[in-house]
Image: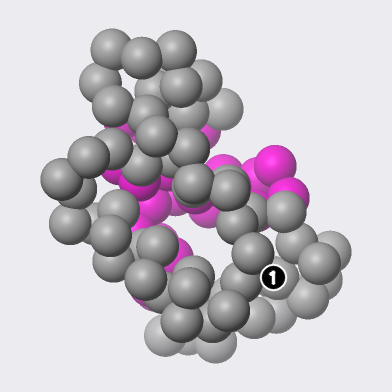
Amino acid sequence: MSDIEIFTQPYCPYCVRAVELLKSKKLSFSEINAPHGTAERTEAIRRSGGRTTAPQIFINGRSIGGCSELLAMERAGNLDALLTSA
């Protein structure tokens, strides 16, 4: 099973949408609260190669981007393949 981490911030509609997609697929994931100015946010930016948008999603330690990238992967049928390849 894949290790999924999602760094979110309060009141972020993109974060909510990404979390909803993961939940709808009945995936187990860690949601890390990472509002601006926190160590968690700094960690997400570092791990994502400097991306500052929220959410930041990591699958098996690899940054896949944010909500738009997650939804695009799902629409293209690539998300399930990524999740089962690990």
**Extent of the magenta region:** 48-72
Which residue corresponds to mark 1? 82
Does residue 52 appear to the left or right of 56 in the view shown? left
**Up/down of 27 relative to 13, above or below:** below
Residue beneath the point at 25% across and 21% down: 36
Residue beneath the point at 30% across and 53% down: 15
The three-letter code of the residue at mark 1 reads Leu
**Up/down of 11 relative to 4, above or below:** above
Crowd band around label 1 with a 10 angstrom C-alpha radius: few (<14), some (14–19), many (20+): few
Give percent across and percent down for residue 81.
70, 79
Residue 45 visible? The answer is no
Does residue 16 appear to the left or right of 86 in the view shown? left
Residue 63 visible? The answer is yes
**How many marks are shown on the rendered structure?**
1
Give percent across and percent down for residue 18.
37, 63
Quarter of the figure with residue 55: top left
Quarter of the figure with residue 29: bottom right
